[in-house]
Amino acid sequence: MAKWKELLATVAPSIGSAIGGPLGGLAVSTALEALGVSSDGGEKALKAKLADLSPADYVKLKEADLTYQSRLAELDVEETKAYLADRADARNMRLHSGRWTADILAYLTVFGFFAVIGSFFWFGFELDEDVKDPLLILIGVLGAAFKDIYQFFFGSSRGSKEKTGVISQMNEGKKNV
């Protein structure tokens, strides 16, 4: 590893660990912006600036590291908001469109799931291999669909609820600032 990257990783760990990764561009531009250097030069400009840092620049890099962490948190919140909005749109469409397609497909899938499992108990587990293997595959597919239907109608998880609460609190904090 180059010495300039080691220095950056020591002074601004979040930025230093992001260099070379998918968010490296954001990390480099955040560091350069804090140091008052144009971000057009990219890593080369950062490397040159790191060779001649003043004590004030170290403080600026520390602050840039905190700014970078906050930008990452904002991106995560935006991604979560988009995900939750997509889920809400799907549920609202179902409620307000008057179409019963999703309900009918859900009922058929749940019925099919339990019908296939019931057929194993009704006919016993000693089915022909030609029938048994496709039936097991069908149970797997219907089980996955059953899980998706449950998540659609009842929410994905408790963690999703907690994340929604955290996002609401963060939004309230931004409004009060």
Image (cartoon, rainbow, N blue to C red):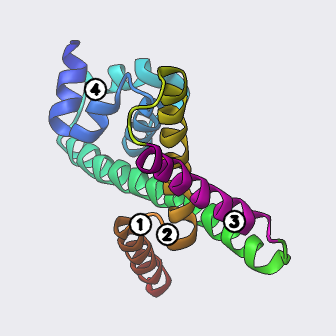
- Look at label 4 and name its amino acid: Leu
Dominant secondary structure of the magenta stretch?
helix
The furthest residue to the right: 98
Q: Element type at marker 1?
A: helix
Tell me, yes or no, if residue 25 can be seen here.
Answer: yes
Question: Does label 1 or label 2 sit earlier along the sequence?
Answer: 2
**Image height check: is 15 above or below 171?**
above
Asked whether 121 or 102 is in front, the reply is 121
Q: Position of residue 118 (x, y in %)?
A: 47, 53
Q: Residues within 10 Å of mark 4 (few under 14, many from 20)?
A: many
Query: What is the distance, in whole Å, between disc 1 and disc 4 at their CAs?
Result: 42 Å
CB within 8 Å, label 1 to label 2: yes
Q: Element type at marker 2?
A: loop
- Residue indicated by mark 4: 50
Task: Answer whether residue 117 is magenta in the image.
Answer: yes
- Residue indicated by mark 2: 155
Query: What is the distance, in whole Å, between disc 4 and disc 2 at their CAs?
Result: 49 Å
- Look at label 2 and name its amino acid: Gly
- Look at label 3 and name its amino acid: Ala
Tell me, yes or no, if residue 79 can be seen here.
Answer: no
CB within 8 Å, label 4 to label 3: no
**Image height check: is 13 above or below 118?**
above
Question: Where is the C terminus found, in terms of image quarters?
Answer: bottom left
Q: Position of residue 37 (x, y in %)?
A: 45, 35
- Residue indicated by mark 1: 160
The furthest residue to the bottom: 176
Q: Which residues are magenta?
A: 100-123
**Image height check: is 32 above or below 160?**
above
Q: Element type at marker 4?
A: helix
Q: Position of residue 163 (x, y in %)?
A: 39, 68
CB within 8 Å, label 2 to label 3: no
- Residue indicated by mark 3: 90
